[in-house]
Image (cartoon, rainbow, N blue to C red):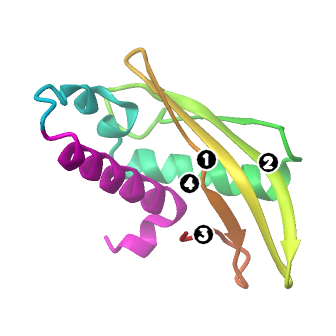
Amino acid sequence: MSPTSHGFAYTLVRCSLIAALSMSFVCASANNLNFLRDTPISYMKPADRQALNRAAQHALETQKDGESVAWSNEGTGNPVHIEGTVTPRDTLQSGGETCRNVTLVAVAKGQTQSWTPVACKTASGEWRIKKR
């Protein structure tokens, strides 16, 4: 499956993993980095990312700033239950482009993880994470 077919959630997960790996190199002197293994993102499979992507697309398209949409990985086949929220914030229109900050929250095995990327609406109507 290509990275573009994973859409919004794939880009988010990929950026988060790169950031986590980068942090591990910076903190190489700290021998115990096992905490990264138990974050919700570490339990996410492609179907879970697709569920998050669907929820994010729906929330970004339909919710007002500050209104959350709940999501979960129910029905994805992953034995680890993952749930959370998607909350669009701070909608900004500039140069014919609509962008929104979006807070994504995932909870798995008692751990909570959140991200706040900027998503912009493409000409095709899909929301994509804006590269910074």
| Residue 17 position (above or below residue 10) | above
Front tag of 2 and 4: 2
In this picture, residue 85 sits left or right of residue 43: right
Q: Which mark is residue 130?
A: 3
Q: Secondary structure at mark 2?
A: strand
49 or 40, which is in the foreground? 40
Magenta: main secondary structure equals: helix
Q: Which mark is residue 53?
A: 4
Q: Secondary structure at mark 3?
A: loop
Q: Which quadrant of the rendered structure holds the C terminus?
A: bottom right
Residue 41 place in picture, x, y as percent: 37, 39
N-term mark: 1 or 3: 1
Q: Which residue is mark 2?
A: 89
Q: Amino acid at mark 4?
A: Asn
Q: Badge 3 local density, few (<14 within 10 Å), some, or many (20+)? A: some
Q: Secondary structure at mark 4?
A: helix
- Marks 2 and 3 in Cβ contact (< 8 Å): no
Label 1, label 3: how far apart the Cα atoms are: 11 Å
| Residue 115 position (above or below residue 34) | below
Label 2, label 4: how far apart the Cα atoms are: 17 Å
Q: Amino acid at mark 3?
A: Lys
| Residue 69 position (above or below residue 102) | above
Q: Amino acid at mark 2?
A: Arg
Q: Which residue is mark 1?
A: 116
96 or 84, which is in the foreground? 96
Q: Which quadrant of the rendered structure holds the N terminus?
A: bottom left
